[in-house]
Each structure stands twice: as C-alpha cells, then as structure tokens.
Amino acid sequence: MFSQLRIVIAEDAAIMRDGLTQTLTRRGHDVVAAVADADALRQAVDAHLPDVAIIDVRMPPTHTDEGLRAALSIHRDHPKVGVLVFSQYIETRSAAELFAGAPAGVGYLIKDRVADVSDFIEALSRVAQGGTVLDPEVVRHLLGASRRAEALATLTAREREVLSLMAQGRSNAAIAATLVISPGVVEKHVASIFAKLGLAPSDNDNRRVIAAIRYLES
Amino acid sequence: MAEMHVWPRRDLRLTDGVLAAALFAASAGQWHGPAATRLPLVAVSALLAATVLPRRRYPAAAFAAGTVIAAAQIAFGLQPGGAAPSAYALQPTTTDLVILVLLATLAAYGPRRISVAGLVVCLAGCVAAIMRWAPAHQPSPGPSLFAAALGLAGLTLAAWVLGDSVAYRYRRAYYASLEERAARLEAERNAQAQLAAAAERARELQERRARAVEDSAARLRRIERDLHDGAQVRLTALAMALGEIKENLGAAGGGADPTADDAARTRMLVAAAHQNAKDTLAELRDLARGIHPPVLDRGLGAALSMLSETSAIPVGLDVSIPERPSPAIEAIAYFCAAELLANVAKHGAASRATISVIEQDGRLLMNVTDDGGGGARLVPGGGLAGLLERVQTVDGSLRADSPPGGPTVIAIELPGHA
C-alpha cells in the first residue's frame, strides 16, 4: 500500500536538507521543493500544495520558532497539507500550540527520529494522510509531568504503554503491531483506559490523540 | 594648635562692669568741695568709667569717646578742687586710668595702625595735660616735669605694649587656626578626591563585569547555535545514513550465502554504529541545552513554561514581567529555577511547586515555592550556595525560607541588567 508522497522540506542546514531529500527520493517519494527559510517555505507550499511539509522549528532570521509559526499558518491556510514540525529539542509548549484546535495532519518530532528511516517515513505518511504524530519523548514528558498522576496510577503497565502509543498518534493496528498483541486486545485496553480516566470513547484516531493529550496536559 | 583661653562673653561683660564700677568708685575720695565743683567731676568720672563697657566690641569708638571726655576734662580743668589756679599741681582723677585701659583694649582688639594712632593721641594728651597744669607752672619745673612726663608716658606705653602683646597672642593663635583649617581642608579635599576615584573605579569595574557577564552569556548562546548548526546537523545526517544502511542490509540479509557470516557481522556493526550515533545525538542535545536552552531566546516566560512542563512534579507558573531582562539575567534566572525544580523533585516529598516572577523597581523577583518537607539550608558547597554564587555575580541575592515541615520558599532577586 505504498503511496508516493509529494513533499516540501524547509530546513536551513544544507546537510540535513540534502540528506533528507536524497533519502526520501531513494524511498520513491517526490521532494518538490527544499528551502531554507519560512518565506520560501510558504511560497513553495502555495505553489506546489504538497501532501506534507517537513519544517524545522529554528530557521533564519531569528532562529527561534519561525518554523512553528509557518507550520501554523500553513495548516490554517491549507488544511489538506500535512505539517511535520522538526525540533532539535523537546518543547512541549510548541507541541501544545501545534496541537491546539483541530490537529488533523499535524506532527511534532525530535530531529533524531530521522535516524530510524522507516519509522520516520511511516510517521510522515501518517501526517500526510491527515493523521497525528507526537514524539514519544514529548508523550513521556506529558505522562511524567501530568497533574493527573493519581488517575494514571490506576492504569496497568500495559495500559500505560498503550496510552503512550495512542498519544503518539498510532492507530490500533499500529499499536497492536508494536506491542505484538491482537487488535482486539488493543481495543480492550483502550476502552479500559478511557473508562479509568473518565474520557469519552472515540473511534476517530485523531480525536483520540487529542483527548489523550488534553488529558495529560490539563 | 595654639590653645587659647576664651572667656565666655557673659563673664567678659561682668568683668568690664566690675572694672567700670571700680574705676568710677576709685575717684570717690576726690569728689569734695562745693557741689558746682563736685558734680561735674562725678559726671566726668561716670562718663569715663562708662566707656569701659563697650570697649571690647567697639575698641576704637570707646577709645575715641574716652579721649574726647578726657580732653574735655583737661580743657575745662575739671579736677579735684575745681578749675585749677596755675600754681596747682596736676591732679587727674583716678578714673582717668580708664584711658590706659581703653588704649590697651585698642591695642589688643583693634588694628595695629589705629592702636599706634591711639598711642600717639595719648602721648599728645600727656603733653597737653602736663602743659595745662603743674608742674609746668611751678617756679623750677625741671625735675618735676621730667618725672611727670616719664610717669605718664611710661604708663601709656606700658598700657599699649600690654594690649599689643595680647593682640600678638591672638593673631598668632588666629594664624595657627587658619593654618590648621587650611590643612584640614586640604586633607578633606584629598579624601574626597580619593573617594571620587574609588567610586569611579567601582563604576568602571561594575561596567566591566556587566560586559563580561553579558559577553559570556552571548558566547554560550553562540556555542549552542554552533553546535546546533554544526555538530548536531552532521551527526543527524550521519545517523540517518547509518539508519538507511542498516535497513538496506536488513532487507538484503538472509539466505544460505557463503558470505552470510560476514554480512551478519556487518549488520551488527552498522546497527551498533547507528545506535551509537543516536545515543551521541541525545547526549549532544542535553549538552547543548545545558549550555544555553534555545527556548530562552523566546523569553524567560517561555523558557520557564517549558521547564515547568517537563518537570517531574506539577508546577504552577506565574510570570509577570513587562520588559525582558538582559539575556544574562534571563539565563541566570532560568538556571536557578531549573536547579531548584530539580532539587524539589530529587528530595521528593513535594507534590507541587510554584514559580512566580515579577518585576519591581527594575529588579526581577523570582520565588520558587514547594510544599515539601522543608529544611533547605544555605550551606557552603551546597546546591543553594552554588546558586547564590551565581546570583551574586550580578549583585543579586538569594534567601531561603524553609522551616522543618515546609513549605520551602526560595526568593531570588536579580537586577534587570547585569
């Protein structure tokens, strides 16, 4: 079920930009533009309307959060274009900003994730198809710093694993594959988690992710 | 310094009053004869004695008044026994001694040239007195004349010399005090100059320190940026390449190839290299963030917000600063908060922490509070002491209030600029 993605890359470091372009091209995807700053990114997205844009958070001129601002504006103007924001550091705040509203086709990953090429491309595809991707590290932080420690403590170890994967934006099938259990068992875990945390059950993966993140953040 | 005994003004007035009364009374024995002779004599004596009273304040005027009265006395021949027939010997009243007192006073308190003039007037008066009365009119005046002249002139000179010596002592003391005052002024000026120099130096050092602190903050920021743009990027690209190689090898693996062992070994090596690259990336990330958290570039509020989100315990955050402090100050505040939150998490017990940051009179006040067991102490070599040192590099302060049983409040105060 391989589908070729049309991709725009915005990354100010040439080595990364070229490396990503080559890797993605070798995997059969079409990198329609690779740019180095936010303005060029917006032009490229307007011109090409790609399936997904990979955006570095820090870009010229101030090297702070230009990428994040660009991602938010692209997501607002072109809801069909998936945005995968890339950050060198875990910034829960940036992630939260990105995931506010209706975060279909949004992803937030630490840059290191490109090292696991297949996983990275899988995440990219999910974002391109309107799914949600949240870096496992961010999820770990959310779980660790959550004010709902008491409710979370009632979860079993397996349920915590499932919640973590769910918050990362994985589908039931993906969770089942990762944990090597049957999809039916995953569904049972999910129902149990939602019941224990007092969340309204949802079949929609995205809404499920949002519910989980909101819960952890609140 | 020449010590000078100065009588209180009230005592001086009393002294002069007594002196005037004594001089007046001294001639009481000479008031005899008919009223017409006696009363003018009493009046002259009283007037003369009265000039003693203002002598210190107005030495020249008192002297002038005294001489005028004495001149009148001579002119009108007011003396014991009435206007003298030419054969009478000179008979000044005892009160005439007032003139000597006034001359001495003039010499003591007045300028010297005036006192010399006074001396001349007195000597002239002596001559006049002698000419006017006896013994110039005696049959053989020689020895008596000489004796009178010697006596009167001698007394007059003695009075003048006495007064002048007092003036000399006064002047010497006055010059000494002037010199002393000049020396004191000079010393004061020197001290003030030294103070000014020290203040200037302190200001200069303060500026230099501020520059050094800001420079070092900027340098750390640059190092982080360099790591981010350089080593981290290259390492990420390397890890990506290794990841691809690993996956390619994995896909091509398997089968009863005679080189299967080699391939397996290569796969293992590549997998290890891949893992190494990823671990190094993670370490490098922590290192870079420790040098300068990039989120600080977005302001202290954003940085503290991220800090509280990633904290192991729930953190309430309240940041209210209208203006951004300088980067070095933001960095110090951030690192203090990070260290304090890490401490809170490490020592357990606390279920919640709060960070509040406000600005007051251009200074940054940050309170980090937790509901743990308390007992945090500022001990040499301890974590809090380390923070205090860091805060003191910019003249900040740190106070710990942590009674047993909690809560703990660490209050940090920083200037708006280094």
Image (tube, rainbow, N blue to C red):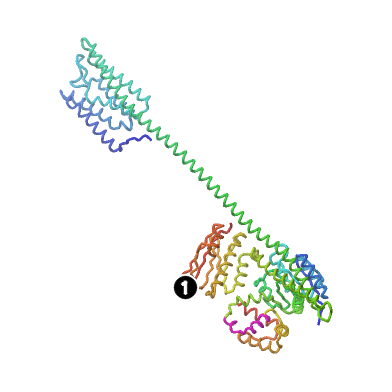
| Residue B301 picture quarter | bottom right
Where A173 falls versus B323 (above or below)?
below
Main SS class of the magenta portion in the image: helix
- Most foreground residue, B5 or A76: B5
Residue A188: x %, y % from top left: 66, 89
Residue B256: x %, y % from top left: 83, 81
Q: Secondary structure at mark 1?
A: loop
Q: Residue at x 32, y 24 (%)?
A: B161
Residue under label 1, please give it. B405
Q: Is residue B339 visible?
A: yes
Q: Residue at x 17, y 20 (%)?
A: B81
Outermost residue toward the right?
B257
- Dividing the image into 4 quarters, which one contains the N terminus of chain B? top left
Label 1 Cα neighbours within 10 Å, binned few <14 / some 14-19 / many ≥20: few
Outermost residue toward the left?
B33
- Most foreground residue, B341 or B330: B341
Look at the image and give the residue range highlighted in magenta: A150-166
> For this view, does B102 lie left or right of residue B249?
left
Where A200 falls versus A127 (above or below)?
below
Residue B348: x %, y % from top left: 54, 74
Q: Residue at x 40, y 32 (%)?
A: B175
